[in-house]
Image: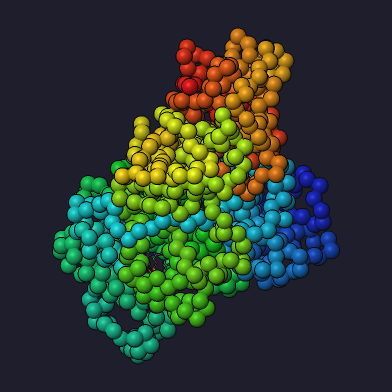
Amino acid sequence: MLLTDNPRIAAHLAALPLPGPTLVACTVAASPGVIHLPRAEEAAIGAVWNSYDANRERRPLQHVRAFTDLRAAPWPQAPTSPLLTLQELFFLAAQHLSLHRTAGSSLAALILDPLVHGLPHPHAALLTGLVKNATWELPQMRTHAVVTDTSRLQTALDELQHESRVAGGLPVGYYRVGARSAEHLIPAPLTGQQHRNTVTDDSVIVAAGGARGITATALRGLTALSRPEIWLLGSTPVADLAHQAEAVGTTGRITYVRQCLAATPGVSVVEAGAQWDRLQHARQALHTLSMLRRQCGGTRVHYLTCDVTEPTTVKAAAEQIYRTSGRVDLLIHAAGIGRARTLRAKTLAAFRKVRSVKVDGYHHLKAAFADPAPAAWCTFSSIAGVLGLPGECDYGPANDTLNAAARYETMRGRDERAIAWTMWGESGLGPSSGFTDLTRRTGRLSLIGDAEGQRLFTTELTAPPGLAHAVPIYLGAPEQHTVAPHYPGLVPAAPAFAFFNTPARLTLCEPASAAWCLDLRPYTYLLGHRRNGRALLPGALAIELAVEAAHRLVPGGTAAEVTRIRFRAPIAAAPRDTRYELHATHTSHHEGRQSVHIEIRSTARPAAPERPRSALHFAADVILGSHRAQPRPSPCPPASSSGRQQRRGAEARLALPFDSIRRPRTDSHGVHALCRLDLTGQDLRHFSRMATCWLVIDAALQTAAFIAPGRLATPRSIGAVRLPGVLTNDHMLAASGTEIICTASPDRRQTQATVTTSDQNTTLVCIEDLELA
Ligand SMILES: NC(=O)c1ccc[n+]([C@@H]2O[C@H](COP(=O)([O-])OP(=O)(O)OC[C@H]3O[C@@H](n4cnc5c(N)ncnc54)[C@H](OP(=O)(O)O)[C@@H]3O)[C@@H](O)[C@H]2O)c1
């Protein structure tokens, strides 16, 4: 069964020579031969499958695929109704497969997506999040999803087939220009101190879902540090119920229901129980209000009855808040309901309700609080969104959509995060629903105590700019134990960075900084880069180290260029008496972008020094954020055909992988050479973790050196190395077989060098204002 919300995809699928009985259904009217399913209803999947082509031999539904195209989907608009219906049908189909458990069945989703800056559109998570959650409950089945930037449906289908054979990690593959990437969880530092005053006495906070549960507890932790003005939103009409809520006091549920049935003939047990729940919610909200008012002042904490699933109510609440407080500094979207049940036992109505509070609620809040937008936004999301969990096929994808939204908003330069909480043990749904006890028994998740939850929340909110994570997730030992057999490799055992992992020093107070001891001795291939008989660190590798350190200091940041590069003194690859250290300092904004200043320093310890001498070897600024457009490569003659052949000076001796320049030629434009990357015999895992194509940058610098034959021609300074929009490394380039041309042209006293692919369509790197020694 092929499900889609896109008539073009439906028509394409219907025209394919598909094996066996295949049904194509679309939530929008499509071409003949495609079944139109404008609404999802309970048991719709079984009904449509059985009624389809009734003359045919009955075969059980075995394989389900969902397709959507998000390439033109706007953001931050809510998902369209056909897409939501597609998700509901996909959920019902998963439920159908779970009920019938036909051998060899499969469930998969395919999403066409521009993958802007490598990030999936948040709506993609409606389907990929469902796959992640369903995979826990369909262990005998193949469950997978692909998000791809290809515009060719056939290519996308091939990628989906490829993904069905991938083992390990989350069951979602991201395909960019044909290359697969996957999500990994990378350990990131967290300290317990407050680093900036995100919330002060002047702040205005809006917390949807903040009047009770874990959010009320988290807010109480925040207000221990300052006394902000707080607006709490909840669907419970607290003022209307206050009197009854106080009267019911601590009366237990069963006693209350008995009393109700005796006092009011005709009332059902369910109604009486629901009324007790409402009164308890009102009691909890009243308690929160009184606690927060005690901390912040009697007139500074407000409660508005506001169901976030109703856009007009949310708009009215926003208008009242703007009228009274003028602005919002922090908006917390923590409204949520849990209906954890097995996939088989879930109802479509509950599925819609759980999604609506999270996803519709998010978009209603975004729309109502758009002008002026809150300075910061924090969503209370769940680990079920990141990893999927059994029983959460509604809640998991809804949370995953909000996680993806936080990433997308961060990419758009907004201060937004979604905290993917694991279980709180003392507050919220856990203790009241029996989840705390269940979690304690199964040991599947950690149980965060109130004090720890408050500390984590405050730490995330007060992280210095650039050091906040869009989607932080806390993996304790129980989570790691749960995840390891289910998603092998999701938390990589090997370091994520080629050269750095744990810094020797890390300061998160502004300006955030880190320092690493630079010990390059394990990388013996560096001994093959020799100048005048000494193994020296290639200048291009210093650039790679700078980028890696900046990425490490600013998780989620992507280097766009490295500027003001100064090579002050050589760095020995195998030093005897010298210790090198790399220092990275977050220097905040550079023309609206973040920047990290890097220095490599050495401490020499000669025989009897009074004090160790510190020397600067390398300095640069790594600029993170959006990329300036690379210039279109200017046409140059094929490297092999014209110009005068060049020979390298004898002082430089290069072994593989540095000996990469072929057929260098000079002509009136400058020097051209072919770059042949050869990583034969190298540790490819090490090279696959590199952040830049630094061997190619090295090749460009070698090419530029031919401009001054006879001189040592090592780089002294570089104005800027501009990196490609999607970072690529030498391993990827070598594997792709791309032919690379390096071009260097003297421009007055300085040199420009460019690396392009041989078809001259892609500029890989642009080196500006290179000064040679
Ligand atoms: N507890 C945990 O361990 C945990 C773990 C991971 C994630 N989370 C997330 O953290 C958030 C809070 O969870 P919790 O455990 O504290 O749950 P909770 O005690 O049930 O609190 C839920 C809050 O959401 C509000 N809410 C529900 N539906 C709403 C609606 N339609 N409009 C406005 N407000 C609504 C509730 O207020 P009303 O009843 O007055 O509407 C209440 O304040 C949820 O988003 C949840 O997904 C919690």
Q: Position of residue 339 (x, y in %)?
A: 49, 70
Q: Position of residue 692 (x, y in %)?
A: 55, 38
Q: Residue furthest front?
A: 608
Q: Residue at x 58, y 40 (%)?
A: 526
Q: Residue furthest top?
A: 668
Q: How many marks?
A: 0
Q: Is residue 428 above or below residue 308?
A: below
Q: Residue at x 60, y 39 (%)?
A: 527
Quarter of the image that includes the N terminus: bottom right
Q: Residue at x 55, y 70 (%)?
A: 481
Q: Is residue 326 above or below residue 446?
A: above
Q: Is residue 771 above or below residue 434?
A: above
Viewer can see residue 643: yes
Residue 347 appears left or right of 451: right
Viewer-proximal residue, 521 or 304? 521
Q: Residue furthest left?
A: 298
Q: Position of residue 216 (x, y in %)?
A: 30, 66
Q: Quadrant of ligand 1?
A: bottom left
Q: Position of residue 65 (x, y in %)?
A: 68, 55
Viewer-proximal residue, 624 or 137? 624
Viewer can see residue 623: no
Q: Residue at x 73, y 64 (%)?
A: 105
Q: How is the image coloured?
A: rainbow
Residue 107 sits in quarter: bottom right
